[in-house]
Image (cartoon, helix red, strand yellow):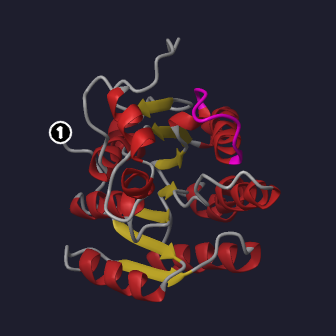
Amino acid sequence: MDLGLSGKKALITGATRGIGRAIAHLLADEGADLAICSRNQEEVDSAIADLSAKGVKVTGAVVDVADRESYQAWITSAGEEMGGIDIFVPNVSAGGGDMSEQGWVNNFNVDLLGTTRGVEAAMPFLEKSDAASIVVISSTAGVETFMGPAPYNAIKGALIVHAKQLSQALAPNGIRVNTVSPGPIYFEGGAWEFIKENMSELYDATLADIPQGHMGSPEEIANTVAFLASPAASLITGVNLVADGGFTKRVQL
């Protein structure tokens, strides 16, 4: 199936490793031009080289999404350089595990405001697109209790609510908004590799609770994001698509 992504212009935050990089690679394989960012220059340079080799246009920069002024300025600059923005994927996260007040601040500034500020800056470009799509990256930690009260869980839940409300507000403008909520995703250098090496009981218990018998991969999440971002999903907006191998147990009505 042709997803209709060739020639589209996508902006992805946190796109140099893990899920973000997998999304960037798949969109590039589908023929989309890209703007990517992270906080590490070496990783940005490496990702640009790899992605450019696929024959698409790629621009990238070192950006701290918690810095509103520089973050929004980069989105505007990237949109102008690419000649538009059709797809916005606010993927970057402050991560979980920090239960302190600073942890709340970090998740609020990076995960939540990183999304809302990004949408605000990308809006002038999205409004001009004939196939505009925003795909927010949340987590199953935002839909079902996992490991107790935590800033990460609460903020990821807030993103699902915000994306749904945003989908209603932007639909008349031809802009679709959906959320993808990954379950446990394992990749080199990721959170679950750390947990496997340092908290083996938690890792084993979590793995045992996944009916498919394995944790997900960044590439599997990228497949989900690419479909929702594409014109092939033109009728879908306001959805929170859970990709977790059966890890969550609730009934989604």
Can residue 171 be seen? Answer: yes
Q: Is residue 102 above or below residue 234?
A: below
What x and y, as percent, mark residue 51? 27, 74
Q: Main secondary structure of the magenta part?
A: loop
Q: Is residue 145 above or below residue 75?
A: above
- For label 1, count other residues whose C-alpha is less than 10 Å away and answer few (under 14), some (14-19) or many (20+): few
Can residue 169 be seen? Answer: no
Which image quadrant is residue 44 in? bottom left
Which image quadrant is residue 213 in? top left
In the structure shown, which secondary structural element does the residue marked by tag 1 occupy?
A: loop
What x and y, as percent, mark residue 217? 29, 48
Q: Is residue 145 magenta?
A: yes
Please name whichever residue, 253 or 207, is drawn nearer the observer in this view of the structure.
207
185 left or right of 119 in image: left
The residue segment tinted magenta is 143-151
- Residue at 72% from the left image edge and 61% from the top image edge: 106
176 left or right of 1 in image: right
Q: Is residue 154 magenta?
A: no
Which residue ends up furthest to the right in the rendered image? Answer: 101
Quarter occupied by the N terminus:
top left
What x and y, as percent, mark residue 140? 51, 34
130 left or right of 225 in image: right
Type of amino acid under label 1: Met
Please name whichever residue, 70 or 196, is drawn nearer the observer in this view of the structure.
196
- Residue at 60% from the left image edge and 52% from the top image edge: 96
Mark 1 = which residue?
A: 1
151 left or right of 40 in image: right
